[in-house]
Image: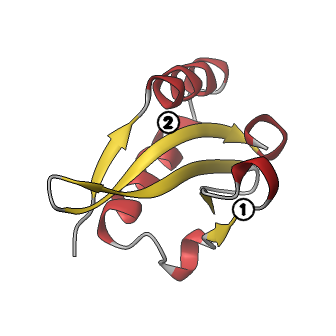
Amino acid sequence: MKRALLPSKAFIRSAKRLTKRDPSLAADLETVLTILEEDAFHPSLRTHKLKGKLSKSWACSAGYDLRVVSQLVKHEGREALLLEAAGTHDEVY
């Protein structure tokens, strides 16, 4: 089941900053978003629940040190992913 991807303003800012700093990460980010839309828990993403102040969020890997943080939400009666942040491990946590 496809999920809608809802990018937050913070996600858009962080993705732009990330791809400006390292343009080669744009393709990795695009690939991860495509997989997330199809299956947020695909084994290649290593999706996991976060703890602490991000306890409502999930993180997935988009490469060695690239992470995408999102929340499962309802949007127009179906499941969606609210994209919260993209960046390195240290940037998003």
Examine the rendering and report whether any part of residue 61 can be seen. no
Between 74 and 49, the one nearer to me in the picture: 74
**Label 1 vs label 2: CA separation?**
24 Å
Q: Amino acid at mark 2?
A: Ala
Can see residue 6? yes
Where's residue 81, x and y in %? 38, 54
Which residue is denoted by mark 1 in the rendering?
A: 50
Which of the 4 image quarters holds residue 14?
top right
Q: Is residue 93 left or right of residue 3?
A: right
The image shows residue 67, relative to residue 59, as above or below, that is above
In x, y percent, where is residue 16? 52, 21
Mark 1: give few (<14), some (14-19) or many (20+) Cα within 10 Å: some
- Residue pictured at 77% horizontal, 47% vertical: 53
Q: 79 or 13, which is in the foreground?
A: 79
Label 2: state its secondary structure.
Answer: helix
Residue at left offset 67%, top offset 37% = 87
Residue 32 position in % (x across, y down): 47, 56
Judge the density around disc 2: few (<14), some (14-19), many (≥20) Cα neighbours within 10 Å. Answer: some
Q: Which residue is mark 2?
A: 26
Tell which tag, 1 or 2, sits nearer the viewer.
Answer: 1
Residue 79 relative to residue 57: left or right: left
